[in-house]
Structures are given as C-alpha cells and as structure tokens.
Image: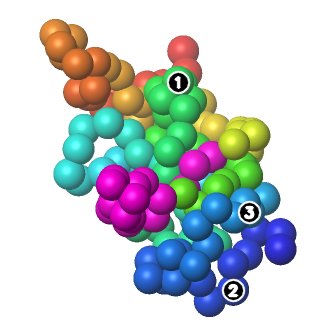
Amino acid sequence: MKGTIGNAGKMADLDTLVGRFFGHIELETCRDTHVSRPRVRPTDSFSPDIRVEFPRALREMFPIGTRFMATVKVCQNHMDGRSHGPPYLRAYDVAVIAASVSDQGLMAKVRKGSISGLAYDYVWTTKD
C-alpha cells in the first residue's frame, strides 16, 4: 500500500484506519490562517485538511513549501476511554525532498518576545 489509501481520504473514513502505518507519503510545510506557527499537510494521499504531528525543528529549518517524504501513522487521541477530537497523522522517518528546497523563500521565525515560543513571524529570505 505504497503512498495511497484508496477512497479513505475523507476525514470520516480515517476512523477505520486508526493505528495503521502508510509509507512514502508526501508532506509539505504551509501557513495556517488560524495560527501563526508553520503547519505540515499531506499533498496527495490524504486530505490536506488533516493535521500532521511533525518535528518542529524541521518546520523552522526549511522555507514554507518544502516537501518531505515520510511514513505516517493514523492516530487518535482518547479521553476517558472515548475518542477525543479528529484523527490525525504522526510523521516518522522524515526525509527532505531536496528538489523542493529553494534558495529563497518564506521562513518561519519565532517571534521575539514570545513567552510560549509558539508565536511566529514570516520573513522572506534570499541567498546572499
């Protein structure tokens, strides 16, 4: 089942896939309109609305739009023995797709004075 989940790309269908791993899934960093920190989304095999648990250091190290190849696991939080919130993906064995890294781009930088360290500003960087 390399990089595809058939018709399970809909959020409702993910409930049946909790606990399963999928290899060779392409992910990309992106901006979220609701929060300042950079997010990661699937590009083809899953719906782009699905949240992805992804290493923070990699989100900050590369420009927005950088693509990665990873193995993902469909996960579900539980509270009091019951499902809590929608299923999400957790990325493992992450590799950068080198061709997607540009010399210039929008970089996420932790906002100065951020108490939590989770507020970001976006800075356009160029290769000098």
* Foreground residue among 19 and 4: 19
Reading the chain from its start, which is encountered first: label 3 or label 2? 2
Residue at the (33%, 53%) spot, across then down: 79
Compared with residue 124, is residue 52 higher up or lower down, i.e. above or below?
Answer: below
Magenta span: 76-91
Compared with residue 38, is residue 78 higher up or lower down, i.e. above or below?
Answer: below
Q: Position of residue 104 (x, y in %)?
A: 52, 32
Quadrant in which the N terminus appears: bottom right
Q: Estimate the spatial distance between the alpha carbons at disc 1 and disc 2, rounded to whole Å.
A: 31 Å
> Badges 1 and 3: C-beta atoms under 8 Å apart?
no
What's the colour scheme? rainbow
Q: Position of residue 37 (x, y in %)?
A: 32, 36
Answer with the quarter of the image where residue 113 lies: top left
Quadrant in which the C terminus appears: top right
Q: Nearer the viewer, mark 1 or mark 2?
A: 2
Label annotation for residue 6: 2
Q: Which residue is mark 3?
A: 22
Residue 85 appears in the picture as rendered: yes
Mark 3 residue crowding within 10 angstroms, few (<14) / some (14–19) / many (20+): some
Q: Position of residue 54 (x, y in %)?
A: 53, 40
Q: Estimate the spatial distance between the alpha carbons at disc 3 and disc 2, rounded to whole Å.
A: 12 Å
Helix or strand or loop: what does disc 2 sit on? loop
Reading the chain from its start, which is encountered first: label 1 or label 2? 2
Residue 111 appears in the picture as rendered: no
Residue type at mark 2: give it: Gly
Relative horizontal placement of residue 43, taking residue 88 as reference (left or right)? right
Compared with residue 118, is residue 37 higher up or lower down, i.e. above or below?
Answer: below
